[in-house]
Image (tube, rainbow, N blue to C red):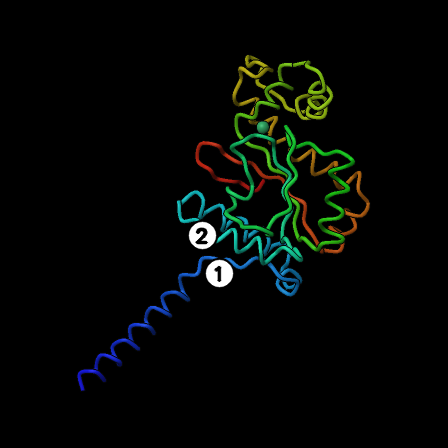
Amino acid sequence: MTHRLFSTALVLLLLVAGIALATDLPSDRPYVTFNAAKQDAMTPEMAINKLKAGNRRFVDGTMHNRDLSAQAQRTASAQYPFAVILSCLDSRSAPEIIFDQGVGDLFVARVAGNVISDDILGSFEFATKVSGSKVIVVMGHSACGAVMGACDGVELGHLTGLLAKIMPAVDATPVPADAQRNASNADFVEAVTAANTKLQVAEILRQSPILKALVDQGEIKVVPAMHNLSTGEVEFL
Ligand SMILES: [Zn+2]
């Protein structure tokens, strides 16, 4: 009798342990990396909402506890990222982290000042037309050194040509009569950064007929956003 009780207790213990093990597996739901069916079923709006929810978790300190090694193994043979992010080179504006996404969830292009180029446009055409991502986010961030450099007319090696791509945003941003049009004016820098994300979105649609057609067909959205380094929040403009 004692033996049977012990056996029953042992079985119950193993069952409970098994359930705990199953629910605690960090690599599984609800953090699964995407498959083709899930990617297909997603709309551009859903993709944006998924990014917003991930950013909320980042800001709140409730990020998913993923098993990134397991995700790497499971996505090794195929990828179905739901979103594309063009962000600044800045070390603090890392898309996978601030949107709380895992391996295989995002295509990411990064360059100082989050400006486009032919190579980046080609990458975006691949990411959406070929690989099925639903949204392209052009994300600037607060206190951007590249934008400050453009505001101050900095010239340095290859940086000069890169900052020239931000100049249309500098030129298009008004300031009050008594305010400075340079990097010492934080409000000006912020306004130029936001203007730059919008201008880059416009340039993407102007320069890529493929991406423009996908937008017109409702297959994707291309949207500007701003990342606040202090709060961690991403605002979709
Ligand atoms: Zn920056």
Q: Residues within 10 Å of mark 1 (few under 14, many from 20)?
A: few
Q: Is residue 30 above or below residue 232?
A: below
Q: Is residue 35 above or below residue 108?
A: below
**Whole-percent x and y of residue 86?**
64, 39
Mark 1 or 2, nearer chain start: 1
Determine the image quadrant of residue 10. bottom left
Q: Are marks 1 and 2 in contact (CB under 8 Å)?
A: yes
Determine the image quadrant of residue 165. top right
* Most distant residue in the right direction: 209
Tag shown at residue 91: none
Is the CB–ligand 1 distance for label 1 below 8 Å?
A: no
* Residue at which label 1 appears: 30
Left or right of 41? Residue 70 is left
Q: Is residue 175 above or below residue 55?
A: above
* Most distant residue in the bottom direction: 1
Quarter of the figure that contains the N terminus = bottom left
Quarter of the figure that contains the C terminus = top right
* Most distant residue in the left direction: 2
Q: Secondary structure at mark 2?
A: loop
Residue drawn at x 63%, y 28% as measured from the top left: 112
Is the CB–ligand 1 distance for label 2 below 8 Å?
A: no
Q: Amino acid at mark 1?
A: Pro
Tag shown at residue 64: 2
Q: Residues within 10 Å of mark 2 (few under 14, many from 20)?
A: some
Residue drawn at x 68%, y 25% as measured from the top left: 166
For ligand 1, give the image quadrant. top right
Q: Secondary structure at mark 1?
A: loop
**Whole-percent x and y of residue 28?**
49, 61
Alpha carbons under labels 1 and 2: distance apart: 9 Å
Q: Amino acid at mark 2?
A: His
